[in-house]
Image: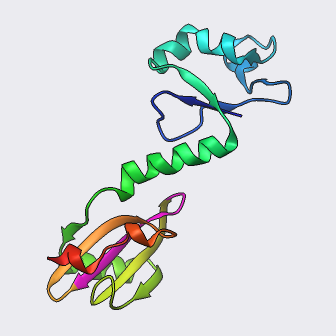
Amino acid sequence: MYVISKPFNGQAISILDDEGKVALTSTLHNNGQGNLAFEDYAQLEEVQRRYPGGVELVSEEEFARIQDEWLKDQYTSKPPREVSEDHYYHMRDVVMPMKVGSGTHGDHWFICGEIITASIATMHAHRGDKYLAKEVDINDKSTWIRMEDFT
């Protein structure tokens, strides 16, 4: 089980240990007297101040789903932005691309080999003299730059 903030901020705060208590709370909040139960942890003044919306427990599967939604909202849901020709070629030449191609996503395109987080990376594409960049999920082509983005 994962401890996360409400609203979710992109990362787990902690996990439950083998005894079902919030890991690391013994040294951080309880003067070495043992890890705290989730209910006790959630009531700590410091936790309530840091996470005013509260905290909650989620399963590993639920955490993966919530994190995926958060990543899409933070990165891949944004439209492509126009970049200069110099920027396009600088990124292509400096950061080793992990994927390259032509057609479908522009006359020429590449995805930077530098991962931002999880499976999110920056895609660059150009068509004629228009150059675009966008954060995409490398495993989800629906987030990639499309030909219609150039119109």
Q: Is residue 143 magenta?
A: no
Q: Nearer the viewer, residue 72 or 32?
A: 72
Q: Quadrant of the N terminus?
A: top right
Residue shown at the point (29%, 57%) measured from the top left: 78
Choose top left, top right, bottom left or bottom right for residue 143.
bottom left
Q: Nearer the viewer, residue 115 or 71?
A: 71
Residue shown at the point (44%, 17%) measured from the top left: 52
Choose top left, top right, bottom left or bottom right for residue 147.
bottom left
Say left or right for 107 vs 49: left
Check the image and report above or below for 27 versus 61. above
Q: Nearer the viewer, residue 33 or 72?
A: 72
Dominant SS in magenta: strand
Residue 60: x and y, percent? Answer: 68, 43
Residue 127: x and y, percent? Answer: 21, 86
Number of marks in picture:
0
Residue 51: x and y, percent? Answer: 48, 21
Residue 38: x and y, percent? Answer: 69, 18
Residue shown at the point (54%, 13%) measured from the top left: 46
Residues drawn in magenta: 117-126
Check the image and report above or below for 27 versus 125. above
Check the image and report above or below for 62 versus 22. below
Q: Quadrant of the C terminus?
A: bottom left
Check the image and report above or below for 29 versus 133. above
Residue located farthest toward the right when viewing the structure as drawn? 19
Q: Is residue 121 magenta?
A: yes
Say left or right for 110 vs 106: right
